[in-house]
Image (cartoon, grey):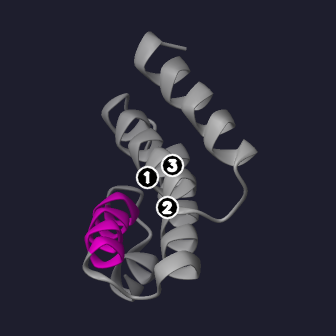
Amino acid sequence: MGIPYATAYRALELAQAQGEPSVSTAMVRRNLAEITERMGAASEAQIWIEEACRDLEATYGRTPMAAETREIAARIAFACGDLDSAQDH
């Protein structure tokens, strides 16, 4: 586990201590998705980004921030070959 990933994971622990779902947990999960995607672990990134989408929509509903996160989710799903999920986003 690299330093950026370890730091982001610790940030998730801190955000979760404040309760779930929240914008904090959503943004940390989104960061973890982008980190793991860059590390070449698209299937792990897909899990993180799906959770980020869920947290954002549960907290705020369908907002521009949630839409931007769904765009990332579509890109990651496409990279995983999950075309149905990519289209849903």
Gap in angstroms between the C-alphas marked 1 and 3: 5 Å
In the image, residue 36 lies at what x, y percent?
Answer: 43, 35
Was residue 33 drawn as part of the magenta stretch in this picture?
Answer: no
Please, is residue 87 above or below residue 51 in the view? below
* Mark closer to the observer (1, 3): 1
In the image, residue 26 lies at what x, y percent?
Answer: 50, 58
Was residue 66 drawn as part of the magenta stretch in this picture?
Answer: yes
Residue type at tag 2: Val
Q: Which residues are magenta?
A: 65-78
Residue type at tag 3: Arg
Residue 3 image-quadrant placement = top left
Q: Which residue is mark 1?
A: 27
Residue 82 image-quadrant placement = bottom left
Majority secondary structure of magenta residues: helix
Identify the mark at residue 23; answer none if there is no mark.
Answer: 2
Q: Could you say which is closer to the camera, residue 1 or residue 66? A: 66
Residue type at tag 1: Met
Gap in angstroms between the C-alphas marked 2 and 1: 6 Å
